[in-house]
């Protein structure tokens, strides 16, 4: 059963209250209105006992999250015993309500394993046999409501209506619970598939980090030697400085890949400073892009920034820059605002906008519309937002391009 659905004991308790009310109304009508000679004291005693048991069963249902099948069967045994007593005292198999012995079987057939259903069938069959063996014949009735046969037909009609309502309502409730569970399982399967691909990508990234660290260190040393005054070469000082900055940025990113695995907290500054560093580092890597930014970070918390937020921001900026570049534009807009402990942002490009081949959110790993793309940006972005408990949405920007809106909690 779904966690949002009531457990089986609680459902049985609700049905039992309906049974108590129906039994009480029937006995009252038969004894006080139709003036049928029935053992009223014994009947009222059985109904009262069932009501008292249900008071305890309601308390039990609140304490038990997932009842064992044996306990469910024990609760149904009380219902069958009381029903057998009532039927035996009111005509036995001639009672039009004798088919109510089938209801417990119908209830457990859709909720319990087959062997417990068979046990319930045996129990209900025993109750039916006991009611038939110890049946007390009904007296002949002739009143304004008709004779005995007419009352029997009326009782069968009422019994059919009651049985149909009980079975329909219970089966409908169970079908709804199963549909909710199926939806949850489908979402879990989708999330598991996506996370499995991301885990494979993370494993590969760790290997790449190990392989790149040594050549990057060697390249840094060579650049330092090339920058010396007596070095021979055609590269300008500005080019060499740019190369050094790019190498340093790559080296820092490689080191950050290993930081979470080593238990190192890479965030030594407040969240606002970290966001500024992420933006400046991106501008260093993409100097050809004209970034129009509007940031309100004064309300950012004093603690550091989750590394996933920086990854997300850089991925969205890169996607926007690529989208603008494909349309011959170099502009990208960035809006950031911190309010109530949340980071709200919008990244807008000036590209051609949506097309039919663009993957929808949350995106699919290794699918891309870029000639040299890896197809991981959108899926990783959504996975980061999902992990942090935020929101991510895409919409057509006014005039031209696409705007990606996100909201992320800046929790410590």
Image: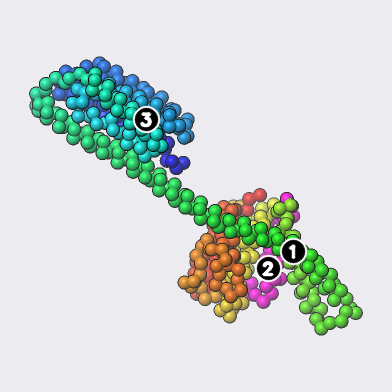
Q: Quadrant location of residue 315?
A: bottom right
Q: Is residue 262 magenta?
A: no
Q: Specify start and end residues of the magenta stretch as a single range.
A: 263-291
Which residue does the image show at 18% across and 33% down from the upper left?
A: 156
| Nearest-to-viewer mark from 1 and 3 | 3
Tell which residue pokes out farthest to the bottom in this image.
234
Badge 1: few (under 14), some or many (20 or more) residues near its Cα, within 10 Å? few
| Nearest-to-viewer mark from 2 and 1 | 1
| Nearest-to-viewer mark from 3 and 2 | 3
Q: Is residue 221 visible?
A: yes
In the rendered image, the vertical position of residue 373 relative to residue 252, given as above or below: below
Distance Cα–Cα, label 3 vs label 2? 69 Å
For disc 3, the marked residue is 119
Which residue does the image show at 37% across and 30% down from the upper left?
A: 119
Q: Secondary structure at mark 3?
A: helix
Q: Position of residue 13 (x, y in %)?
A: 37, 31
For disc 2, the marked residue is 282
């Amino acid at each position: 059963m779904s966690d949002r659905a009531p457990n089986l004991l609680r459902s049985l308790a609700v049905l039992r209250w309906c049974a108590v009310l129906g039994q009480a109304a029937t006995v009252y009508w038969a004894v006080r209105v139709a003036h049928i000679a029935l053992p009223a004291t014994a009947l009222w005693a059985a109904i009262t006992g069932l009501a008292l048991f249900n008071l305890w069963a309601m308390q039990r249902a609140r304490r038990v999250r997932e009842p064992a099948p044996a306990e469910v069967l024990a609760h149904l045994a009380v219902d069958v015993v009381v029903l057998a007593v009532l039927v035996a005292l009111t005509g036995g198999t001639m009672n039009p309500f004798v088919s109510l012995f089938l209801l417990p079987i119908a209830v457990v057939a859709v909720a319990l394993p087959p062997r417990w259903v068979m046990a319930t069938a045996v129990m209900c069959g025993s109750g039916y046999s006991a009611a038939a063996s110890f049946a007390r014949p009904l007296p002949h009735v002739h009143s304004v409501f008709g004779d005995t046969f007419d009352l029997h037909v009326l009782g069968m009609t009422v019994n059919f209506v009651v049985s149909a309502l009980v079975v329909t309502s219970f089966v409908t409730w169970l079908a709804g619970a199963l549909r909710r569970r199926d939806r949850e399982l489908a979402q879990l399967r989708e999330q598991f598939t996506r996370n499995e691909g991301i885990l494979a990508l993370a494993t590969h990234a760790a290997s790449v980090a190990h392989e790149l660290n040594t050549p990057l260190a060697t390249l840094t040393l060579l650049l330092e030697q090339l920058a010396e005054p007596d070095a021979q070469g055609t590269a300008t000082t500005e080019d060499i400085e740019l190369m050094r900055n790019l190498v340093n940025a790559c080296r820092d990113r490689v080191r950050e890949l290993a930081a979470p695995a080593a238990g190192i907290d890479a965030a030594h500054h407040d969240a606002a400073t970290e966001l500024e560093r992420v933006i400046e580092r991106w501008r260093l890597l993409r100097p050809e892009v004209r970034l129009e930014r509007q940031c309100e970070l004064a309300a950012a918390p004093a603690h550091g920034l989750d590394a996933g937020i920086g990854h997300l921001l850089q991925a969205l900026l890169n996607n926007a820059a690529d989208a603008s570049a494909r349309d011959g534009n170099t502009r990208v807009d960035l809006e950031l605002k911190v309010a109530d402990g949340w980071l709200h942002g919008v990244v807008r490009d000036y590209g051609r906008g949506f097309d039919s081949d663009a993957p929808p959110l949350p995106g699919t790993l290794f699918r891309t519309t870029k000639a040299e793309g890896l197809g991981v940006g959108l899926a990783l972005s959504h996975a980061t937002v999902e992990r942090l408990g935020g929101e991510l949405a895409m919409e057509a920007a006014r005039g031209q391009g696409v705007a990606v809106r996100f909201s992320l909690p800046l929790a410590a």
